[in-house]
Amino acid sequence: MPTITILRFDELPRLEEATALLNGKKNGANWISARRNKYNQDEIFIQYWYYEGVESGINRAFSEEDGYEIVNVLKENGRDKILKRRYAFINYVTHSLEVYGGLDSRTKELLKLIEKTLKAKFVSLTLTQEELVELYTKHSAELTKVTFRNQQRNEEISITGKNVAASQEFAELFGYPWSLREICFRPKIKFMNEHNKYVVSLNGDKGTLRVSSNDVFQWRPRFEIRQLIFAIATVIGITDQAKKEAGMKVSANFEKSEGLPAPHNFGVTPTHAY
C-alpha cells in the first residue's frame, strides 16, 4: 500500500515567499522544484529530485531475474545511477506537509532541507484514541480493521471484519491499558471515479496514511487525498477560520471536478487531478 507521511506546522513564510525559497534549493547533487499547485491555490507542489544506484532502484520495480538483466544493460551503457523524485505538498489551510512516501531516510532528508530553507519546524501528526474514533465515525463508510496497543507492555491486537466497532472484542479492548492506534476504513469522500473506491489506513502514532493500490496506478488523485487530509485536520482541531476557508474551497473543488473527463485524472503523478 502506498504511504503518505503527514506532518504539521504552525507558522511558515507566505506561500509565494516559501515557494520562491524552496524552488531550486540544492542538497548536494539533489534538489527541490517547487511551484504553486495550479489545481489548488493554497498548496505548494514540491518535487524532490535525487539520484539512486541502478541496482537498488531497478530491483524494487522488477523481479530479481528481470532486474539483473536491466541493470547489466544500463551499466554496459555507462549508466550506474537513475534520477528519481519524491512528491510532497504543503497545504496552508490544513497546516500540513504531506510527503508521498514513508518516513524513511529520503523523507527525513527532504524534511530537513525544507525546515532549514523555511526556518520552520514540522512535527509528525499524531491522533488520540478519541480522535481516531471521531474520524471513522464521521468520515468512513465502513470500518474494516482496527489495531489496539497495550500501553503497559509491547503488545498489539488487530481486529478485522465487518462492523468491527460493534464487536465484543472491540468493546473489551476499548479502555486502559489498551489504546486504539490504527484504523482501516473506506472513506466517505467524493471520488473522481465512483467505481474505484478503496480502503485507507491511518496510524495514529506515526502520522502515516496508507492507501490501497488499484494495481494500475500507485497514487490516488490529489483531489481525493486532500479530502482525507482535510477530514483529519478538522478532527485534530484547526482554527475556526481555517475550517471555514477550507470548507469553502473543498466545496468549490467538488463543483470544478464534476466537469472533468475522468480518464485524464488518473495519472501516476499525484498532480494530474485535484
Image (cartoon, rainbow, N blue to C red):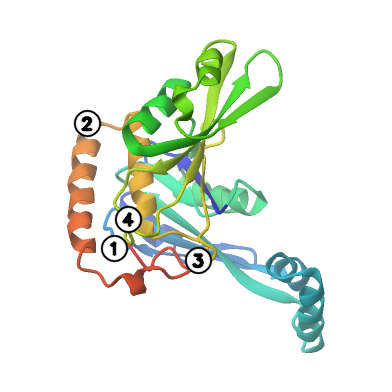
Decide which of 154, 163 is in the foreground and name it.
Answer: 163
Give coordinates of residue 244: x percent, y percent: 18, 38
Q: Amino acid under label 1? A: Tyr
Residue 191 against residue 95 in the figure, above or below:
below
Q: As shown in the figure, which amino acid type bears the numbered disc 4?
A: Phe
Could you tell which of marks 1 and 2 lies nearer the N-terminus? 1
Q: Which mark is residue 217?
A: 3
Residue holding disc 2: 240
In this rendering, does residue 12 appear at all?
A: no
Nearer-N-terminus badge (4/1): 1
Is tag 3's residue or tag 1's residue first in the polypeptide sequence?
1
- For the residues carrying marks 4 and 1, which lies nearer the camera in this image? 4
The quarter of the displayed image where residue 85 is located: bottom right
User: Badge 4 is on which residue?
Assistant: 191
Q: Earlier in the sequence, mark 2 or mark 4?
A: 4
User: What residue is rendered at 61% in x and 48% in y?
Assistant: 108
Q: Residue 39's mark?
A: 1
Quadrant where the C terminus sits is bottom left
